[in-house]
Amino acid sequence: MRIKKTLASICAAVLLIGALTGCAPAETKEPAANGLGESITLNGSTSVQPLAEELAKAFKEKNPDATIDIQGGGSGVGIKSAADGVVDIGMSSRELKPEEKSLKEFKIAVDGIAVIVNPTNEIQGLSMEQILKIYTGEITDWKEVGGKEGKITVVTREEGSGTRGAFIELTKVESKSEGDRTVASAITQGSTGAVITTVAGDPNAIGYASFGSAKENTDIKLISVDGKACTEENIYAGEYKISRPFLMLTQAEPTGLAKAFLDFIISEEGQTVVSGHNYLKAVK
């Protein structure tokens, strides 16, 4: 009898514990957006940023619960943020330097840097040497390169900009011994759009901007470099020399939403978005 009472007490205790802990079968909840109801942050190149935003928009059509926060700041910021683990993905519009190669890099597109002038400028092209001399202040008047007399207004990007970094490296405006030799009188702008606006409003201005951003703009003129036009064909062929990659960077192998987003970008669907916005696919 005592045993029966003990068993009854045990059963009652078990039932009470079950009621208190809700041991009834839990309701199964479907993972949001294929398990991608997460949040990631990107920052870096303002040249890559508009493309990244379009890619995020396309990605979220299939993964509406995913949150992707994209910020600018320049390639230097994106590289450092990725290296420090401050963001999930950093963005760069220049090649990584040897000391930065510990990062995992994903090429998402290729972009030419167009040398741009005002549409009223008679100049159709310049050599790399002439561009170098203009940006270092050795050539100061358009008549020195075959144009009409007029003091050249040099327009550049801010320090830390990936576009500036790539441009001064590729044109040798930056040297190992002297660093960035951009002429002190140059007008410095903080975005691609601001450079284009400045050149469009000054008949004597020269600047540089992302090919993807400048290609369709009728307020400016893209000039040839060393006899090669800034075109998709010439950039892919390596004949137009002022070009650079668009990179996304992570501190380690990406996981979760970061991996899913990067996988989407380099997929055929993602690369269609790239080409649809006037950039060149990562691989032809």
Image (cartoon, rainbow, N blue to C red):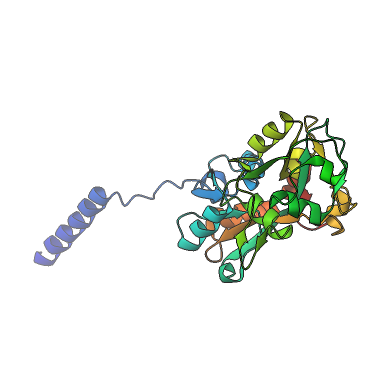
The C terminus: image quadrant: bottom right
Q: Residue 195 in the image: x percent, y percent? A: 67, 38
- Taking depth in this image into account, of 74 and 143 the one nearest to the observer is 143
As drawn, which residue projects farthest toward the left? 2
Q: Residue at x 66, y 57 (%)?
A: 94
Query: Which of the 4 image quadrants contains residue 168?
Result: bottom right
- Taking depth in this image into account, of 227 and 75 the one nearest to the observer is 227
Query: Which of the 4 image quadrants contains residue 245?
Result: bottom right
Q: Residue 143 in the image: x percent, y percent? A: 83, 41
User: As drawn, is 19 to the left or to the right of 198?
Assistant: left
Q: Work out whether residue 66 can be spotted.
A: no
- Taking depth in this image into account, of 68 and 112 the one nearest to the observer is 112
Q: Residue 235 in the image: x percent, y percent? A: 83, 54
- Taking depth in this image into account, of 5 and 185 the one nearest to the observer is 185
The number of callouts visible is: 0
Using the image, determine if residue 278 lies above or below residue 110: above
Q: Residue at x 75, y 48 (%)?
A: 139
The N terminus: image quadrant: bottom left
Using the image, determine if residue 92 lies above or below residue 37: below
Q: Residue 230 in the image: x percent, y percent? A: 84, 47
Q: Residue at x 75, y 34 (%)?
A: 204
Q: Work out whether residue 229 can be spotted.
A: yes
Query: Which of the 4 image quadrants contains residue 96?
Result: bottom right
Using the image, determine if residue 59 lies above or below residue 104: above
